[in-house]
C-alpha cells in the first residue's frame, strides 16, 4: 500500500493567506465601482429625479449585499469543488477552479453558483437595499432584477488557464 502525500493541501492555505489580503482591496474597490456605475446608468434609464441623492442613499447597501452574495456563491463553489474531489470526480473538481468549460459537470456547478449569487442579489436588493429608496414595489423589483442580471459574478465562468 503506497502512502501518497499531497503537498497542495498544505500549500494552498498558505497561498490563500498570502494572496487574499492583497486581492481584497482591488476586489472591493472594483465591485464598488461596477455597482456605482450600474446604479447610475439604471437611474438614468428610468429617468429618476434626484439621481445623486438616490445613489448616495443605497449604494453602500447594494455594494455590501452584492459582495455578500458573491461570497456565498463562491463559498458554494468551493464546497462543490471539495465534494466532487472527495467523490472521485477529480476532472470536474479541477475544472471548476481552472477552466470550467472543459467538463460538463463543472459548467453545471459554476452555473448553479452563479444563479445562486444572482438570486441572492435580487432578494437582498429588493427586500433591503432598495426598500427605503423606492416606494413602488414594481420599481424596486425592476432595479433588483437589473442588478441581479448585470452584476452576476460572471468571472466564476472564466478560465484562468491561458494556454
Image (cartoon, grey):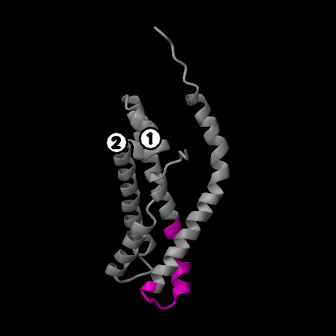
Most distant residue in the bottom direction: 49
Marks 1 and 2 close (CB-CB < 8 Å): yes
Most distant residue in the left direction: 138
Q: Position of residue 145 (x, y in %)?
A: 37, 71
Residue 62 on the magenta segment: yes
The image shows residue 139, relative to residue 156, as above or below, that is below
Mark 1 and mark 2 lie on one chain; the one further toward the N terminus is 1
Q: Position of residue 99 (x, y in %)?
A: 46, 45
Residue 91 on the magenta segment: no
Asked whether, in this view, residue 83 is left or right of residue 6, the answer is: left
**Mark 1, other Cα within 10 Å: few <14 / some 14–19 / many ≥20:** many
* Residues in magenta, as a range: 45-63
Most distant residue in the front direction: 163
> Which residue is located at x 41 percent, y 64 percent?
121
Q: How many marks?
A: 2
Q: Is residue 72 something that shows in the picture?
A: no
Q: Quadrant of residue 81?
A: top left
Q: Which residue is mark 2?
A: 105
Secondary structure of the residue carrying tag 2 is helix
The image shows residue 117, relative to residue 38, as above or below, that is above
Q: Is residue 93 something that shows in the picture?
A: yes
Image quarter in which the C terminus is found:
top right
Name the disc covering residue 152, or none. Answer: none
Q: Position of residue 125 (x, y in %)?
A: 42, 69
**Mark 2, other Cα within 10 Å: few <14 / some 14–19 / many ≥20:** some
Q: Position of residue 47 (x, y in %)?
A: 44, 89
Q: Which residue is mark 1?
A: 95
Separation of marks 1 and 2 at Cα, in angstroms: 9 Å
Amino acid at each position: 500500500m503506497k502512502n501518497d502525500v499531497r503537498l497542495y493541501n498544505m500549500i494552498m492555505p498558505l497561498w490563500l493567506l498570502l494572496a487574499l489580503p492583497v486581492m481584497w482591496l482591488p476586489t472591493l474597490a472594483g465591485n464598488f465601482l461596477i455597482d456605482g456605475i450600474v446604479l447610475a446608468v439604471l437611474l438614468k434609464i428610468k429617468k429618476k429625479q434626484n439621481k445623486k441623492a438616490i445613489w448616495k442613499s443605497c449604494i453602500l447597501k447594494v455594494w455590501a449585499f452584492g459582495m455578500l452574495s458573491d461570497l456565498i456563491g463562491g463559498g458554494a463553489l468551493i464546497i462543490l469543488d471539495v465534494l466532487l474531489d472527495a467523490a472521485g470526480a477529480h476532472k470536474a473538481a479541477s475544472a471548476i477552479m481552472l477552466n470550467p468549460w472543459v467538463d460538463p459537470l463543472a459548467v453545471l456547478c459554476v452555473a448553479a453558483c452563479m444563479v445562486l449569487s444572482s438570486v441572492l442579489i435580487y432578494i437582498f436588493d429588493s427586500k433591503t437595499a432598495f426598500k427605503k429608496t423606492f416606494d413602488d414595489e414594481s420599481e424596486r423589483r425592476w432595479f433588483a432584477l437589473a442588478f441581479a442580471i448585470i452584476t452576476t459574478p460572471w468571472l466564476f465562468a472564466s478560465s484562468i488557464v491561458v494556454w
